[in-house]
Amino acid sequence: MSLLDSALVRLLPAVPKPVVQLFSSRYIAGPRLEDAVTTVRELNTGGKLATVDVLGEEITREEETRAIAQAYREVFAAIDDAALDSNVSVKLTALGLDLSYDLCRENLLDVVRTSAGYGNFVRIDMEDSSTTDDTLRLYRELREDGHDNLGVVLQARLRRTLDDVQALADLEPSVRLCKGIYLEPGAIAFTEYEAVRANFLRCLDALFDSGCYVAVATHDEWLIAESLALIAERDLAPLEYELQMLLGVREERRDELVEAGHRLRVYVPFGEHWYRYSLRRLQENPAMAGTIARATAGRVLRISR
Ligand SMILES: Cc1cc2nc3c(=O)[nH]c(=O)nc-3n(C[C@H](O)[C@H](O)[C@H](O)COP(=O)(O)OP(=O)(O)OC[C@H]3O[C@@H](n4cnc5c(N)ncnc54)[C@H](O)[C@@H]3O)c2cc1C
């Protein structure tokens, strides 16, 4: 990323919402459940699996968290009706973690029980570091209560993650391993690009050592190659791991990986609360961030002329 681009990325939150929406549409299935169903059907037709996320990060009231849990019930019914190959991903803040741990637990239980009724699976996304302890605690509580259709996410960016892998080992968790999108301070996180990559591989190795099912979630070509080398060394069969990518990112590479015989799952967000998710995706795409900033500057200049 050039210095200019990285400065522009920091300015993205000041970009008008309609511009953000225009440039981020590739990352989101659409506002409605039907949009997600259409996207997942297309992915399935192309040999890919999906995980559906109901966008809900901007919610602040208890009724809204219950509405998100209800939206997941509708997602499971739609997946079942259309015989789609998809599970779901949930964010605990959308289920009320910022409001109350117990409310969030209740909503998560509701989603997990509904999922079990359909023989489906729920992945808890990992959010910023203020939520890590509660997320792992809730994950353990539910697993210890016998809810086995539940997985979690670990972030290679965090220094604690290798310890978390060891601490979770007794549960043989299903883990999505990603770099971690939330920029955290150096005291708790690796801040250098190469250090995050190195920790990703250390954690992946440790997860395989403890017999976990791992979803390797990255678009980083070097990491994909190194992860596949580890998988080959361990002689894992295609059903013993999966690769994951985000909707709208590296679509050609997705196809190649599927053709090479890997299971590949695409993260499919949909819903009205698209703004924060979109900002994060654009901030990760430096070329796009620059383009948006230039388009916005052009608009502002035209308006002020
Ligand atoms: C399925 C999935 C689920 C995730 N869940 C979580 C989660 O629960 N918690 C969490 O903190 N993070 C999550 N992430 C995000 C992840 O942590 C990273 O922030 C994100 O994947 C970018 O890191 P990267 O490994 O792809 O490497 P990067 O070095 O960021 O990207 C590698 C290359 O991929 C391409 N690329 C990456 N992002 C974009 C983009 N937005 N637009 C266009 N091209 C792009 C570029 O070519 C880039 O050079 C998830 C990622 C995936 C794939």
Image (cartoon, helix red, strand yellow):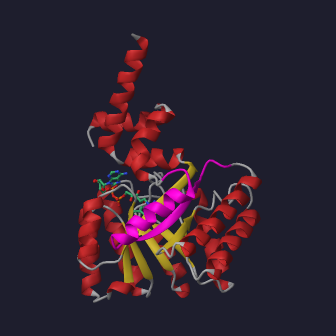
Q: Is residue 237 left or right of residue 145?
A: left
Position of residue 300 measured from the top left corner of the image (x, y, whole percent): 41, 20
- Magenta stretch? 30-59
Quadrant of the image where one finds ligand 1: bottom left
Q: Residue at x 29, y 88 (%)?
A: 234
Q: Residue furthest front?
A: 81
Q: Is residue 303 magenta?
A: no
Q: Is residue 41 magenta?
A: yes
Locate residue 97: give its quadrant.
bottom right
Q: Residue at x 76, y 66 (%)?
A: 102
Position of residue 42 measured from the top left corner of the image (x, y, whole percent): 39, 65
Q: Residue at x 42, y 78 (%)?
A: 214
Q: Is residue 8 left or right of residue 120?
A: left
In this picture, is 7 found above or below 62? above
Q: In this view of the protein, can residue 126 be seen by the observer?
A: no
Residue in front for this viewpoint, 42 or 166:
42
Where is the C terminus found, in terms of image quarters? top left
Q: Is residue 34 left or right of residue 217?
A: right
In this picture, is 244 found above or below 55? below
Where is the N terminus found, in terms of image quarters? top left
